[in-house]
Image: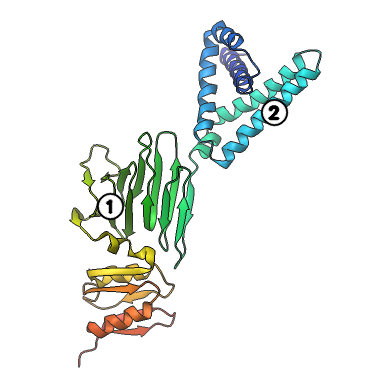
């Protein structure tokens, strides 16, 4: 046997012993004095304990995850069985071997690393289909209101509440927890909050952040030292990769009108308006022809009334609409007389 293999065996033994102590302590089946004596018996014991205890704490940090609950309950269940076996046996050796076998399994999981990484990096994904809205209440009481065709990933840890707006639009009603900032990533931007309410709309390469109440800080996602923008209620921040940030006062009720089934536009380009309507229907609007997407329109429209919107556009702008073979709607300039 080589020196390295001997060392590996010793290290594995220490880890098994540490895992055994962790489960015994978790079950209240060991005295503090005995544990302290084991800990002081050899420097390697303390190192092994730190490894095992850190992993056990990590289980607690992610205790809300179903996979983690199952793993921990299984481990503790086996520990209880081992204790019962010990009580019935004349010798402590059988139950100790049983518990050591279980501890060895725990060590293998810890050593596997990638299995733990998959569990602890687990994220919950919430999506909506065309025409669907959904409200999600998270474990801390925060609420996400998802607009149509929206995708959000949520990953909570002990130190941070991490959310990613992948597509679409959502309103975030954040529960106060100063020790765990609520961070939303979207379109290369990072929005940081503690307890507040705000709306985020990711449309193409443009992100619109509307602050409803409280305060948020926005900065580029990938650069921690980048300049940040603090927002106040009633402000909207427009961000895109190819333009400077625009911070403006806005009517919050307009930005959140989608929650009540309406869209409100004030001098928006037809390109933006069409993109918003396309979130809500399988019948997609297509703008064809030079300058069509740049024409502007104002008004209040029902999300589900696509035909009414098209009728309004063609009545007030020099445009015509035709139905495509696939059921979509093309909007083009009126033919020259």
Determine which of the numbered discs, if any, sits on residue 78 in the image.
Answer: 2
In the rendered image, residue 26, in percent from the top left (x then y), is placed at 60, 23
254 relative to 283 in the view: left or right: left
In the rendered image, residue 155, in percent from the top left (x then y), is placed at 45, 43
Check disc 1 and report its element: helix, strand or loop.
Answer: strand
336 relative to 143 in the view: left or right: left
Q: Residue at x 40, y 34 (%)?
A: 159
Q: Residue at x 37, y 81 (%)?
A: 307
Q: Residue at x 32, y 43 (%)?
A: 193
Q: Residue at x 19, y 53 (%)?
A: 247
The alpha-carbon separation of the residues under discs 1 and 2 comes to 50 Å
324 relative to 125 in the view: left or right: left
Q: Check disc 1 and report the residue beneath it.
A: 211
Residue mark closest to the camera, 1 vs 2: 1
On the image, which quarter does residue 262 sit in? bottom left
Residue nearest the observer in this picture, 322 or 263: 263
Check disc 2 and report its element: helix, strand or loop.
Answer: helix
Image quadrant in which the C terminus is located:
bottom left
């Amino acid at each position: 046997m080589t020196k390295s293999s001997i060392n590996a065996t010793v290290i594995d033994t220490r880890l098994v012993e540490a895992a055994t102590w962790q489960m015994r302590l978790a079950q209240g089946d060991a005295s503090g004095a005995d544990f302290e004596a084991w800990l002081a018996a050899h420097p390697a014991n303390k190192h092994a304990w730190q490894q095992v205890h850190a992993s056990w704490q990590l289980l607690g940090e992610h205790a809300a995850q179903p996979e983690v609950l199952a793993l921990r309950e299984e481990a503790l269940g086996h520990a209880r069985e081992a204790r019962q076996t010990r009580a019935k046996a004349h010798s402590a050796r059988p139950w100790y071997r049983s518990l050591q076998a279980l501890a060895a399994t725990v060590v293998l999981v810890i050593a596997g690393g990638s299995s733990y990484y998959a569990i602890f990096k687990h994220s919950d994904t919430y999506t909506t289909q065309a025409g669907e809205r959904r409200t999600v209440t998270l474990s801390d009481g925060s609420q996400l209101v998802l607009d149509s065709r929206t995708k959000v990933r949520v990953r909570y840890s002990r130190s941070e509440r991490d959310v990613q707006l992948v597509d679409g639009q959502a309103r975030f009603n954040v529960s106060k927890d100063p020790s765990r900032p609520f961070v939303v990533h979207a379109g290369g931007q990072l929005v940081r909050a503690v307890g507040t309410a705000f709306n985020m709309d990711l449309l193409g390469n443009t992100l619109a952040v509307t602050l409803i109440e409280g305060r948020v800080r926005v900065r580029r996602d990938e650069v921690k030292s980048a300049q940040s923008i603090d927002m106040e209620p009633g402000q909207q921040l427009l961000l895109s990769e190819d333009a400077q940030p625009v911070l403006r006062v806005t009517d919050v009720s307009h930005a959140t009108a989608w929650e009540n089934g309406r869209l409100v536009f004030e001098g928006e380009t037809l390109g933006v308006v069409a993109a918003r309507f396309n979130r809500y229907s399988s019948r997609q609007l297509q703008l064809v022809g030079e300058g069509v997407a740049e024409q502007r329109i104002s008004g209040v429209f029902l999300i589900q009334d696509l035909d009414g919107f098209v009728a309004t556009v063609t009545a007030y702008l020099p445009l015509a609409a035709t139905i495509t073979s696939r059921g979509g709607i093309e909007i083009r300039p009126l033919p020259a007389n």
